[in-house]
Image: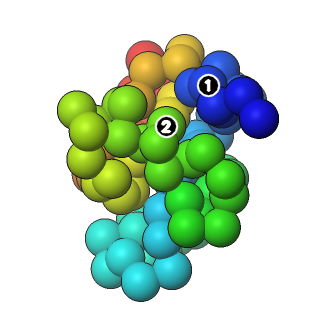
Amino acid sequence: MNQPATSDYTPESGSITMFSTSWCGYCRRLKSQLDAQGIGYTEVNIEEVPGTAELVEQLNDGNQTVPTVIFPDGSSATNPSLIEVKQRLTA
């Protein structure tokens, strides 16, 4: 099986893809903030989707740090604030 690429998870304009785990407090906080602001996201649990933990490692210098977010322009951010997400979606 081929390793997933960032482009496989690039979201539609105005939304983000968030790599997370079920036990990540920072992920839960960001999700609740996004929900409150009406910002769309697709959540990908790196413990359940094959290859995505490795993809997160590639984006984070070998670390499985979540939440890792991919933006519509293909760029990524690790544990971004709600303000950063909003700024990058409107840029």
Q: Which mark is residue 35?
A: none
Marks 2 and 1, the one that precedes in the sequence: 1
- Please name the residue that numbered disc 1 is placed on: 5
Q: Nearer the viewer, residue 38 or 4?
A: 4
Amino acid type, callout 1: Ala
Residue 43 in view (yes/no): no
Disc 1: CA contacts within 10 A as few (<14), some (14-19) or many (>=20): some
43 vs 25: above or below: above
46 vs 18: above or below: below
Q: Tell me the residue at 52%/29% (across/down).
A: 71
Residue 48 appears at what percent x and percent y?
Answer: 65, 67
* Contact between labelled residues 1 and 2, with CB atoms less than 8 Å apart: yes
- Please name the residue that numbered disc 2 is placed on: 55
Q: Tell me the residue at 33%/53% (across/down).
A: 64
Tell me: 29 left or right of 47: left
Q: Tell me the residue at 72%/28% (across/down).
A: 2
**Secondary element type, mark 2:** helix
**Secondary element type, mark 1:** loop
